[in-house]
Amino acid sequence: MSVTDMYYRGASGCVVMFDVTSRKSFQNAASWKQDMDSKTMLPENRPVPCLLLANKCDLRRPAVTQGDIERFSDEHGFLAWKVVSVKKNKNISESMTILVQNMMTWEDLQMSCREESCTKFLSQETKPRSCC
């Protein structure tokens, strides 16, 4: 068992954050998400909802476009993506709200299914809107 296995065990949500000014950081996000997906799942083999955050939007020279981020998010199965600035506290609360609401919806559905002795799945309908 690796150290990351211990961090992932029992996870109900995930955030992958990269530096929007670093192309390498952006590319590494794929392996971080893949690592998470390979080591943990929700019941019924559903992937853990994972939010992609593009940090440092307060800096003027992004190395990654919003189009790149959107395609990347779709290709790698992220719940949603947001451009954020941790330093300036931009879009942090909104991002966490998206993730927590998704996590709570899944938990609520699981509780109602247990009470009704049914098997229902949260559909992969529409992803939450992503924006900057």
Image (cartoon, rainbow, N blue to C red):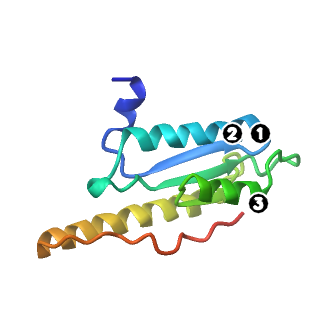
* Element at label 2: helix
Mark 2 and mark 1 in contact? Answer it, CB < 8 Å: yes
- In this figure, which residue is indicated by the disc labeled 3? 67
Which corner quadrant of the image does residue 7 belong to?
top left
- In this figure, which residue is indicated by the disc labeled 1? 23
Q: What amino acid is labelled 2 in the image?
A: Gln
Give the Cα distance between marks 3 and 1: 14 Å
* Element at label 1: helix
| Furthest-right residue in this view | 60
Q: What amino acid is labelled 3 in the image?
A: Gly
**Pointer 3 or 1: first along the chain:** 1
Residue displayed at 27% across by 57% down: 44
**Pointer 3 or 2: first along the chain:** 2
Residue displayed at 72% across by 51% down: 88
Left or right side of 60 for 93: left
Point out the image quarter for the N terminus: top left
| Image coords of residue 82 (percent x, y) | 65, 59
* Element at label 3: helix
